[in-house]
Image (cartoon, coloured by chain):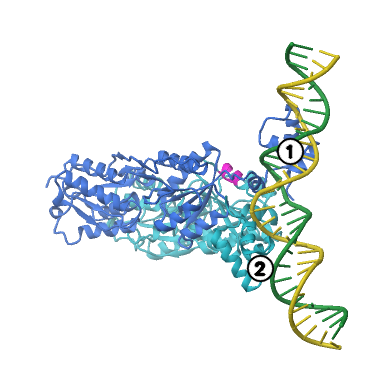
Chain colours: A cyan, B blue, C green, D yellow
Amino acid sequence: MRPTLADVATRAGVSKSLVSLVMRDEPGASPETRRRVLEAAGELGYHPDSRARLLRSGRSRLLGVVFGIQHPFHADLVTGLYTAARETGYELALSAVTAERDEAAAIASLLQDRCEALILLGPQSTAASLGGLAARMPVVVLARSVRVTDLDVVRTDDAEGLRLAVDHLVALGHSRIALIDGGRAPGAADRRRGYGAAMRRHGLTAHIEIVPGGLTEEDGAEAARSLLLGTSGPDDRPTAVTVFNDRCATGVLDVFNRLGLTGRESISVVGFDDSSLARLAHVNLTTIAQNVPEMTRQAVDRALARAHGTPDPVRAAVISPRLVIRGTTAPPPQR
Amino acid sequence: MRPTLADVATRAGVSKSLVSLVMRDEPGASPETRRRVLEAAGELGYHPDSRARLLRSGRSRLLGVVFGIQHPFHADLVTGLYTAARETGYELALSAVTAERDEAAAIASLLQDRCEALILLGPQSTAASLGGLAARMPVVVLARSVRVTDLDVVRTDDAEGLRLAVDHLVALGHSRIALIDGGRAPGAADRRRGYGAAMRRHGLTAHIEIVPGGLTEEDGAEAARSLLLGTSGPDDRPTAVTVFNDRCATGVLDVFNRLGLTGRESISVVGFDDSSLARLAHVNLTTIAQNVPEMTRQAVDRALARAHGTPDPVRAAVISPRLVIRGTTAPPPQR
DNA sequence: GTGGCGGCCTGGAACGTTCCAGGATTTGCG
DNA sequence: CGCAAATCCTGGAACGTTCCAGGCCGCCAC
């Protein structure tokens, strides 16, 4: 049986209450007893039982997080959430969405844990069901835009991201710039809009070309092939392409490399996310970086504010992304 | 305030105990009252408080899982664990290791949750500290071999995996087969051993070549470059390479593709893990598949057996891997 | 001296559940 | 018809914490 407060108390020769004080680092115990209590706890290998602790204190100091375990960018976000939460003294309760465990199941399992708030990473649920959830407890949606009241949204300014990408490519001298799209993925619609607007602003309306893509390497590879398919040669193709996300962009790059598109045939590629993937030296992908530390900090802050009954009056935080120039973009080849 | 058992009880005009029975689906209530209770619970939006429930019942029905959030293969394992756990009626409590949150912190946070057992994915801790942990609670180590009593180990037969890889390459006609190594990573030592043994068995002792590598794409890319560096041409190189894991192998492939190593210069590549990465059509990596469903099922079963005081007498489950032939291996080019 | 105050400590009542012992009421059966 | 068994239900004691109301002591100021 695991040791309890009472065991530590008898061992140290004090009362349960005092041990409780010491474990929580609260004032009210002399340095000497404090030392004795900690020693006893150590010897017994005592760890406070969070269940009992939370049951009694009413507040769980727990933040529920729903994320997609196969999604590398979610890994970056969870990493950020952990550090943001640590500063506030809250713990994270993770619940993963997998191929065989849907979002509803992931959320349901957190509901039993009495989290004080829920942070959902790029959720797929309908606006209606998110609304229903938000009516029952504080909810923050991260990395997806959703028009529902009673919940906070923290997301990147996707349109601006694509403006940055297009501006960069135009500045390098490109005009035939295609977009490989994310379909129904969170943020995809905004990125399409941003792409179209930026192209038009540069007077490149005629060169707008949107290729269906997706979130995975696979989708990127397919899109890259369909981009080249049926073109008669380098003159008949975009000289640059901006891609829905880094993962998809590596698929695109892979196809380009395999086909040996270098020199006169080379095509610039811009990704999105600045995931750890993009930073790898051999990939070295120019990309639009989402501001993960800022996003995760805001998500945690807003979740807690809502939990404490003082929600931020501005429901959506739209964070500016930033362009990271690496090796996959260059001036268009002379043809 | 969230409704409690007592609220439901008064609303339905019965005792707390009765409501408790009904909520747990236990016999002992008439169909009619059962209906009334469920109705009352529904109207109030009642959800049982798992904390109180677990506190009282002593058993948490919770399995702690420590995993590396940046590690794609761990994502596959967690997915398997979820489904394995569901069949047993247990829930998973996830705790991630991130760049800024080490394994000790991940474990400590689970200790507070009174999990009935801990499953550690490829842990980095020393054998000694694992032993200390195992003395205090049931522990299963997954995907790493560790010589410690009082804990279960579930792992792939790494040596056999490399034997499969080498046999396959030899059958194709290769003799100059190099290994790109995983260094100190879990399983790496066994894979080195298996590689050496298989090469010797085929009389290829002279061709044994071990290149330092690692777990990431980056490590793979570097190893690939160093493999080619200083060789005078195709005749001076291995014709095949077997790589520590899929992630590292994609780095290797990437460099090979970029350098345009095709036809007469092409080099076969075998990965390890059969992660979702390898299955992508454009990567199409020949690899050694770890049997994830079997490993995760065993891990959960052994964790529970240990938790219930009936540990499997055989402390280590060594699962056979299987060769998955895809597109990155072929007979050596005629030179 | 005595009152008061601050620092240190204790006892016991919650928190929301489960579990146990037993109280009614009905049913079964000789 | 009576007694046992079965069925349905209730009350209250746990589980391991936190929190509140106090108790004891020594010290200082008047």
The relative height of residue C9 versus residue A115 in the rendered view (above or below) is below
In percent of width and height, residue B294 lies at: 41, 38
Does the magenta segment cover residue B123?
no
Q: Report whether B274 appears left or right of D2.
A: left
**Secondary structure category for the residue under label 1:** helix
- Magenta span: predominant SS is helix
Mark 1 Cα shell of 10 Å, populated few (<14), some (14-19), many (≥20)? few
Amino acid, disc 2: Glu
Q: Report whether B250 appears left or right of B125.
A: left
**Secondary structure category for the residue under label 2:** loop
Q: Would you name the residue on which mark 1 appears?
A: B17
Residue A151 visible within the image: no
Amino acid, disc 1: Ser
Q: What stretch is highlighted in magenta?
A: A103-109
Mark 2 Cα shell of 10 Å, populated few (<14), some (14-19), many (≥20)? few
In percent of width and height, residue A251 lies at: 37, 50
Q: Report whether A55 appears left or right of A124.
A: right
Q: Would you name the residue on which mark 2 appears?
A: A26
Count numbered badges in the picture. 2
In percent of width and height, residue B100 lies at: 48, 63
The answer for which chain carries disc 1 is B
Residue A302 visible within the image: yes
